[in-house]
Amino acid sequence: LVQRGSAGSANPNNASAHAARRKHFGDFCSTRNLGEPHLYTFPPPRRSYVVLANLLWLMAGNTINGKQVRSATLTAYLKAAAEFVTEAGLPDPRFTTTTQHTIQDKYLPRIGKVLTEQRRWESMANKKDPVTPDMVRWLQSQATTAGSTSLSEAIADWTTLGLSAGFRISEYGQSSNKIKKEWMSTGKNGAAELLPRAFIHTDFTFFDEQWNVLPMHRRHEAHFVRITWRKQKHGDNGRHVTFGKASDAQLCPVFAAIRICTRAFTINHKDSLLG
């Protein structure tokens, strides 16, 4: 639902939606032990951070109906949240981090940038919603009994690692049985080799806690994994990105990379593919 007009609009649907959004913010504060939703015990900067945190939480699909919504609806949620604060006689946390009331209703940069990015996303053609941690956990739950070399396990692990790395599908998979290869430099004396486009064994390097390179047979001791993109769409070939262990083991990129390599060594593809 998108609110148009004020909470006191003659349209009962608008008033009902506004009341529901207010309750939603109240529940957000209550479940996080933030106290009353007017946040009067917080200093002004913290009130704004609470509103920002609520906005980011909503953008992840934690709305009343459990769905992602457009920027116009997000601003209506923000208004409902901010009303608790202004009704307590405090400055609007969307517009200021001080004790002074603002004359001009202009979003704080930290909030304005988030909404601008959301509007940019909405304007994109053929856009796809991002994968969320809950989606990844569901994929993992479906793969629990499938076996370590199953397609379900492979999809779950690559999606888990993709939460951190943001892979294109072509970087770890392909749509046909014919392996797509290109001549590309491996960095060895500038020589070029005919290699698969997708990741192979040598593209993943594991490190221990002291940043010592680990041989593959000791990958289970890894605290970091470095991934090499040999070929990229925009030409930034040979780029290295390192990922560390996460506090959430289920979504840890290092653990996912270890499982991917273990599966690849078990399958032992003739072209050393990891996917």
Image (tube, rainbow, N blue to C red):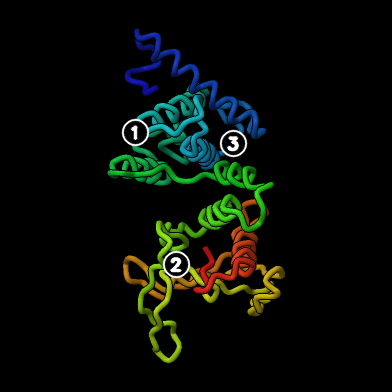
> Viewed as shown, does residue 9 lie left or right of 156?
left
The residues tagged by marks 1 and 2 sit, at their Cα atoms, a distance apart of 49 Å
Q: For the residue labelled by badge 3, is the local secondary structure a helix, a strand or a loop?
A: loop
Left or right: where 126 falls relative to 94: left
Q: Position of residue 234 (x, y in %)?
A: 32, 67
> Residue 267, relative to residue 146: is it above or below?
below
- Residue name at image x 55 percent, y 41 percent: 46
Disc 1 crowd rating (10 Å Cα; few below 14, some 14-19, many 20+) is few
**Helix, strand or loop for disc 1:** loop
Which of the two discs, 1 and 2, labels the residue nearer the N terminus? 1
Mark positioned earlier in the residue sequence (3 or 1): 3
**Quick one: which residue is furthest to the front in this view?**
177
Residue 23 visible? The answer is yes
Q: Which mark is residue 187?
A: none
Q: Which mark is residue 198?
A: 2
For this view, does 47 lie left or right of residue 232?
Answer: right
Q: Quadrant of residue 127?
A: top left
The crowding category of the residue bearing disc 3, from other C-alpha atoms within 10 Å (few below 14, some 14 to 19, many at least 20), is few
Mark 3–mark 2 distance (CA, rounded to whole Å): 50 Å
Mark 3 and mark 2 in contact? Answer it, CB < 8 Å: no
Rendering coords of residue 12 (x, y %): 40, 8
List the residue tagged with mark 3.
42
> Quadrant location of residue 196?
bottom left
Residue 105 got which mark? 1
Identify the residue shown where x is 43% and y is 92%.
189
At 71% from the left and 70% from the top, the residue drawn is: 221
